[in-house]
Amino acid sequence: MAKTSSVDAVIVGAGFSGLYLLYLLRWHGFSTRVFERGGDVGGTWFWNRYPGARCDVESMQYSYSFDEELQQEWTWPEKYSAQPDILRYIGHVADKHDLRKDITFETSVTSAHYLSDANRWTISTDAGETVLSQYFIMATGCISTANMPDIPGIDDFKGNTYHTGAWPHEKVDFAGQHVGVIGTGSSGIQSIPVIAEEAAHLTVFQRTPHWTVPARNVPMTEEYERIWKDNYAERRAQMRYSPSGSLRSVAPMDISALDVTDAEREEAYRERWAAGGMTLLKSYNDLLTSNDANETAAAWVRRRIAETVKDPAKADLLAPKTYPIGTKRLCLDTDYYETYNRENVDLIDIADTPIDRLTVTGLETGGRSFAFDSIVFATGFDAMTGTLLRVDIRGRAGQTLKKKWEAGPRTYLGLMCEGFPNMYTITGPGSPSVKSNMLSSIEQHVELVSDTLVHLRDNAIATMEPDRKAEDDWVDHVQDVANQTLFPKANSWYMGANIPGKPRLFMPYIGGVGTYRKICEDIVADNYRGFKLEGSKAGAAAAE
């Protein structure tokens, strides 16, 4: 029999955003249910268990700030944390605050339909449960729907297949195997060096070379940890209003790359390359807005690739030439380019000769056949919108979210959609999201939603949704800001370019975390400017 219940709020997803939402809404007295398709908490870190999986934001910053005791008691083993350590951290948070009791695991939300007469969402799951809820919150993350390529014969291969975004929970042993890796984005760049050390032979199939810089990861030192823990309050405050939601170990320079000498640029780039991390793109203030400035950094990195990779043909293939550096998500690596010097690693260019088909024993491309024991698909995600559109979401008058977004996602602040009352998207398209330290953006959105629900309850406001003009203006603003940069020049997943048929537009807000936060604060202070709040006594009086 189908089970039906009623709560104040339904949250979809038990990653960083879902857990913090549950914590805050429970604290504010809202009855809440969380549905999670995975077997435990963790979100993207529950699924992305591929070899070498690691965060590209420093551990001391990729963590919650809401719990001071947690900040002081937790110890990270490395500067940049590996997936198992991040998952262990999330599990500790769930245990510390007893969050699992309100989470239903191994359950997917299949539909969410708004009932206008009742001002409620009716939410159905694949377990046959139906829940009525005033508030419906999608906390499903930005990169949580794995993209499997449409390659003929994909079911014919008799060996093992893996996708980096849905990795087995048990250890995968590649020892003695011939392995093929398809894709050289972030997960490929992280996994390829690790697989190469274990496999008898590794063949990498690359369509587009990716820009990557060394992480320079090191064990966490007591001194570095103490610097952060003694100054967390001040540093977190700075992070919240910084451009990226994080603090850089090397300060950015507020000067054009074209206003310094060649020797000065060389010194700056070498300093940041040696420091590691994302600091290279902060060397000068116009690397992401000026083609000429960007090319100085791009050419410099190409020279580093040529210096590192001994085979000139491989080095040339690995050096991006068709898009500016940083306009696809810049990756951090550990010995990625060095891996191509190994005798057991081959690189196959499939830009002009795509993979023809998978076969029983391997694959065929460009008139050549390859035999493998295992094939790894490092082919990324249907980012930003994929997970949201997999759920049958219907707003007022039965309008589907898929129909509303058929020309691209339309939101106000990346938070809400006109026609879908009381539905919130945490770090949704149109917010800084993937162009930021996700933990900073998650906490800002979660706190904004939590405070908003308290405001609605305390003022007897039944529904909230964006005004059409406010939504239209925000969508235009997101694109206008993006078009002032070089980002639209790359066929990136920021633009939806990795998914056939997906509309091409820049999905995250590139204006900066601090700028975005101030915009949100100003909107809230102006009585939620751009939102329609209905059902309160004040609203009824105004209508009369």
Image: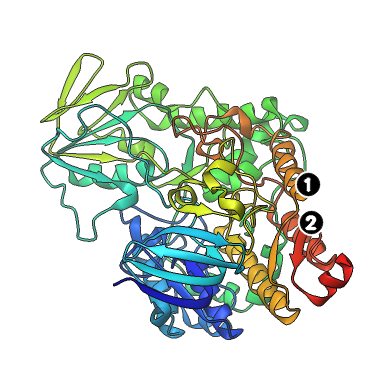
Q: Name the residue under label 1.
A: 469
Of the pair 438 and 419, the residue shown nearer to us: 419
Q: Residue 357 carries which label?
A: none
Q: Distance between the residues labelled 2 and 1?
A: 8 Å
Quarter of the image where the N terminus is located: bottom left
N-term mark: 2 or 1: 1
Residue 128 x %, y %: 33, 66
Q: In this view, does 324 lie above or below 367?
A: below
Residue 153 x %, y %: 20, 29
Q: Residues within 10 Å of mark 2 (few under 14, many from 20)?
A: some
Residue 154 x %, y %: 22, 33
Q: Which residue is drawn at 30% across and 67% down?
A: 39
Q: Is residue 462 left or right of residue 312?
A: right
SS state under label 2: loop
Q: What residue type is labelled 1?
A: Lys
Display coloring: rainbow
Does any portion of residue 337 appear in the rendered image?
A: yes
Q: Residue at x 76, y 61 (%)?
A: 532
SS state under label 1: helix
Of the pair 373 and 24, the residue shown nearer to us: 24
Q: How crowded is mark 1: few (under 14 residues within 10 Å), some or many (20 or more)?
A: few
Q: Residue 462's image quarter? A: bottom right
Q: In this view, does 282 lie to the left or right of 298?
A: right
Q: What residue type is labelled 2?
A: Gly
Residue 419 x %, y %: 65, 53
Q: Name the residue under label 2.
A: 530
Cβ atoms under marks 2 and 1 closer than 8 Å: yes
Q: Residue at x 47, y 30 (%)?
A: 501
